[in-house]
Image (cartoon, rainbow, N blue to C red):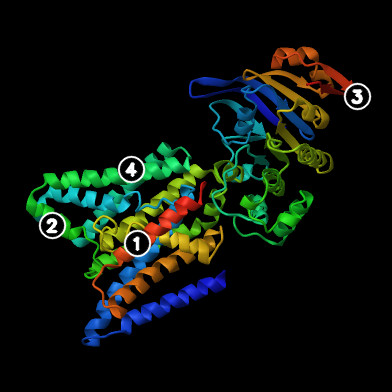
Amino acid sequence: MSGRLAILAAVLVLSALAYMVLKAQGPWSFLLPYRATKLAALILVGVALSVATVMFQTVTANRILTPSLMGFDALYVLVLTLLVHSLGASGYAQIGAAWLFAGNLAAMSVLGLVLFAGLMRLAGGDMVRLVLCGIVLGLLIRALTEFLQRMIDPSEFQMVQSLSFARFTQIDGTLLALSFVAIAVALVLAWRLRHRMDVLALGDAAATGLGEPPARLQRQALILICVLVAAATALVGPLASGGFGPSSFFGLIVTAFAHIVTPSHRHAVLIPSAALIGAVILVGGQLVMERLLGFQTPLTVVIELIGGAVFLILLIKRRAA
Amino acid sequence: MIEIEALHHSIGKAPILNGVDLVIPEGGMTALIGPNGAGKSTLLSLVARLRKIQSGHIRVAGHAVGQVSDQDLARVLAVMPQETRVSARLRVADLVSFGRYPWHRGRPGKADHAIVDRALERFSLDPLRERFLDEISGGQKQRAFAALAYAQDTPYLLLDEPLNNLDIAAARDLMRLMRELADEEGRTIVIVLHDINYAAAFADRLVVMKDGRIAAQGTPGDVITDTMIGEVFGTQAGVRMVDGRPVVIV
């Protein structure tokens, strides 16, 4: 397993290098920092969303539903719309980036936690119901957001629009630093849960018998998931709702690949494996689209296509869990 | 010793346990029997803290269930739950290794591996150790979960209807193994059984439950009588003595 992880790491380093140096047009003094920021954002988002998805799938004991699929990124647009709506466009523009980030992170974490906890209760341990409820909840959030957006005035709406597209092209330095700190802390804490998460995969009763009652651990994991997804979303914008940036299927593809590349039940393997695969897909995908093919097509379209197929295969293949 | 005091429990609005007072002494095998819905499994899962105690007290070897930390209790008491849903794709050996988790919390040592190997051998799972759980039969899976509880190496072992889905050979093997654990390793085994004859053949003590109360307890010979079967189970099955132990004629 560690050999495979090393290979994944090597692939990531190679694609990151290629991303930095290939097809350089313009002075290096501009290109390098510009590309480095973008690269850092890609890796950060890839790692955060992948680890969040692995944990989410363990907590909910399913391999189909992901935080994005149940509309977690749509929650970001909802928070954004609410903020712009209540503060007005000018009021919103006056808040500093750091405060906005903190506000977004806090709001999404709290809302996300309420949402996830509600979802788990609704599902009551039934996988099919969980997936269905999750998708319906996602639709509900999106509909609510759209409804709110229709009520605010056109200039405010435009502001929400411009803010709510995933934007890997214009990354704010402060924002990058902030989300790096948030994601790094969450990753360290997630790593410390790795053995306990292994036990959780045995089912509620067996986990309790081994001295690891699921309720508390699930709450801890959910908080970390919320922080990870919220920080990534606050950095580059919602990934699913606008159709730009990586898509709602991103996490699904990553975990499916992680289970194929490093087939293990141990989170000590799954977490780094998914993190690396997530980063490779984003960096490598962006590299191929931007540098090699010269396409202007957003990476999302491709991920959406592959992700849709993976989703269907997973649904058809597995009847349980 | 497991001490249960004034235990009441309801699920939703339905009362399941109506004041259970029971002492299960240390050592030997105690079987909980009774008709469907008598509260056997609920009682067991309360002792194993799979459910929260609503009212009443339970102490296992002096530890108050619900107050002692979950980690500490996991070193005193192992449970084989009735329903197991593993979401990860696990090999048999991996599953059994989890039995050591309460002791090493994620970092198994040499001694842990040795105990897992012993558990696999004892439960005849050695040939299956590299197989995935979804590639083995229901009975084998059942055995793997029993081995998991065994590997936990606790003085108390609770099993909730472990004979479900087992054919006669597998059921007898499992019961004989449990008997051995009680006799050779001095473990206290509490087992919920559906089949009175298995209980009579293997257990030292029977606890008969009906409508959330203890209806009778004692040795199989004392407890299993025509009248008890009639009163508790509501059916007229005769009891005969065969080789000095009661057998219910079905």
Residue that numbered label 3 is attached to: B244
Q: Earlier in the sequence, mark 2 or mark 4?
A: 4
Chain of the residue under the numbered disc 3 shown in the image: B
Q: Which of A315 and A4 lies nearest the eye of the viewer?
A: A315
Please state which of the two labelled residues, at mark 4 or mark 1, is closer to the viewer.
Answer: 1
Structural distance between the alpha carbons of marks 3 and 4: 63 Å
A53 versus A113 height, above or below? below
Describe residue B152's horizontal placement relative to residue A91 as left or right: right
- Asked whether the residues under marks 4 and 1 belong to the same chain, the reply is yes
Q: Quadrant of the C terminus of chain B?
A: top right
Mark 2 residue type: Met
* Residue A88 position within the rendered picture, expressed as x and y whole percent measured from the top left: 10, 50
| Quarter of the rendering containing residue B214 | top right
At mark 1, the secondary structure is helix
| Residue B120 drawn at (x, y percent) | 74, 53
Do badges 3 and 2 share one subunit? no
Q: Which residue is mark 2?
A: A159
Residue ID at (27%, 82%): A32
Instruction: Identify residue type, mark 4.
Output: Val
Badge 4 density bin: few <14, some 14–19, many ≥20, Cα 10 Å: some
Which residue is labeled 1 in the image? A305
Task: Please give the name of the residue rendered at 52% of the width and 53% of the height, measured from the top-left corner.
Answer: A197
Question: Which chain does the numbered disc 1 sit on?
Answer: A
Label 4 SS: helix
Q: Amino acid at mark 3?
A: Gly
Mark 3 vs 1: CB contact within 8 A: no
Q: Position of residue A265 (x, y in %)?
A: 56, 57
- A161, A206: nearer the viewer: A161
- Viewer-side label of 3, 1: 1
Disc 2 to disc 4, how far (Cα)?
27 Å
Q: Quadrant of the N terminus of chain B?
A: top right
- The CA distance from mark 4 to mark 1 is 21 Å
